[in-house]
Image (cartoon, rainbow, N blue to C red):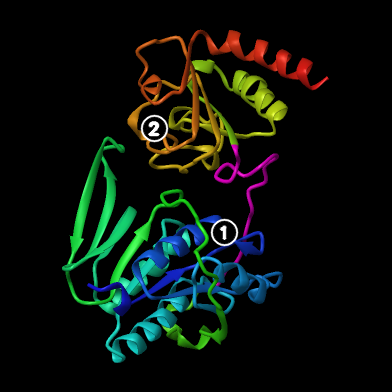
Amino acid sequence: METQNVDVIFVGELSSGALASHTYEIATLARSIGSATKCVLSSSNPSFDSTQAAQQLGEYGVSELHSVNCGSGLSGNALASYIKGLIDTAQSNSRSVIVVGPATYLGRDVLAHLSVFADRNVLANAVGLELNEDGVVSTHMIFGGSKILKAQSSGDSPQLVILRPKSIAPQVGDEKTECKVINEDASGLIDSSATTEIVNSEVSQSEGPALDEASIVVSGGRGLGSQDNYEKLVLGVANELGAATGASRAIVDAGWVPYSKQVGQTGKTVKPEVYIACGISGATQHLVGMKGSKNIIAINTDDQAPVFSVADLGIVADVNVVLPDLIEKLKARKN
């Protein structure tokens, strides 16, 4: 498959009215595998500025931004129907098509519908994507991130791929592309039997930076001993550093913290400048979600804990002794 004959259509997403970080990640990937890249997103947020977003996407080589009105219901079906139209147009012009969506609720929803509409399989949870003469090759982390698998997809176009956020470092292109804004209405594309209605929406409220966007993350595990210690120590360090707080699956399952704080294969993937693992042994399920961090500091009483295998700095000690001292020193330094 030749890059110059490939259109890459990817699902964009918004966060607080602006483009989400993983949209830039997919844009970076799209530029490397296709000669024409098109971002399609739901424009239901009234604060979204499509002109500004197009200027930003142009720096990443995106040629078209399709701002789509999906109606008042869930947008997965409408976006998938709209993208199917783009696929048909591209194929009528003898272009191969790759559709990429993020591994989020929306991305999975859109690609699931497209799988049915286009009668194609989906390469899910990929962390990389490239072309070869036989088609598309995707990279996947398996067995808790301990092994890397390559999957060859050589079927007919379109190729459908779901990309895990934080897998690609966003990077602007060498030259800025003029990104055209296309405003469309897809609400009429949904069959009446498939309509949905959003009856309620709740946004999880949290203090400090978002976990998957923060430059510093302080995470806690069972070694803290109790929920009170998590709130006193992990939150205490995070407050002094202006950091986000995370957690291992064990304490999420125990009910100490909400699922939104879980870092790992079944939680969020983070890549901060500094990741501090407090009382976390480091099962592979957790490591796959944080081992891409630039600097990892681990505190654990077990010197054989797996987390030390990825740590840049390891402290073999009781986290409940280390963190109070750390908090005091951080306060003294601030004063």
Q: Is residue 210 magenta?
A: yes
Q: Tell which of 206 and 95 is nearer to you.
A: 95
Residue 8 visible, this orientation: yes
**Residues shaded magenta:** 197-215
Instruction: Assess disc 2: are there few (<14), some (14-19) or many (≥20) residues with their C-alpha within 10 Å of its C-alpha.
Output: many
User: Which mark, by number, is residue 20?
Assistant: 1
Give the answer, above or below, for where 259 lies relative to 235. below
Q: Residue at x 43, y 69 (%)?
A: 10
Residues at discs 2 and 1 in contact (Cβ within 8 Å): no
Query: For the stretch drawn in magenta, what is the main secondary structure?
Result: loop
Q: Secondary structure at mark 1?
A: loop
Amino acid on which the number 2 mark rests in the picture: Leu
Q: Position of residue 72 (x, y in %)?
A: 59, 76
Amino acid on which the number 1 mark rests in the picture: Ala
Give the answer, above or below, for where 275 lies relative to 118. above
User: Which mark, by number, is residue 304?
Assistant: none
